[in-house]
Amino acid sequence: MVGLANAQTLSGQATDLTGGPIANVSVEILSAEGASLGEQTFANGNYRVNLPARPDDSQGVIVVFTAPGQQSVQVTVN
């Protein structure tokens, strides 16, 4: 689950296919300039990342989720 809590924060919970929380997932925000910032999920799978300022006409934020031993998943959040 991914959602914008407000214009400056991205929060949600990383879960497995059964809905169970996944701890220690890397949640990385990629910018158009190539910079990145991120956090790791807590034991309950929750994460909260402060977003960089972006223009009003932005195409969204690219978020990359990486769990140890798993393939990365990339999503765009508008």
Image (spheres, grey):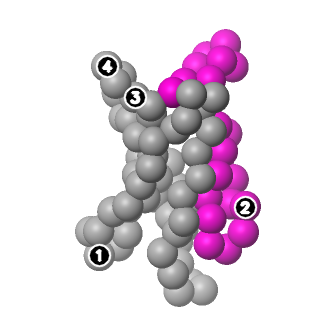
Q: Which residues are magenta?
A: 1-23
Q: Amino acid at mark 3?
A: Ala
Q: Amino acid at mark 4?
A: Gly
Q: Quadrant of the N terminus?
A: top right
- Residue named by callout 2: 5
- Residue named by callout 3: 67
- Residue named by callout 1: 33
Q: Amino acid at mark 2?
A: Ala
Closer to the observer: label 2 or label 1?
Answer: 2
- Residue named by callout 4: 69
Task: Please give the name of the residue rendered at 60% of the width and 86% of the height, measured from the top-left corner.
Answer: 56
**Is residue 4 part of the magenta span, yes or no?**
yes
Precedes in sequence: disc 1 or disc 3: 1
Closer to the observer: label 4 or label 1?
Answer: 4
Sort mark 2 into few (<14), some (14-19) or many (20+) by Cα contacts within 10 Å: few
Task: Please give the name of the residue rendered at 56% of the width and 28% of the height, measured from the top-left corner.
Answer: 43
- Residue 76: percent from the left, percent from the top? 52, 55
Precedes in sequence: disc 2 or disc 1: 2
Q: Residue furthest top?
A: 18
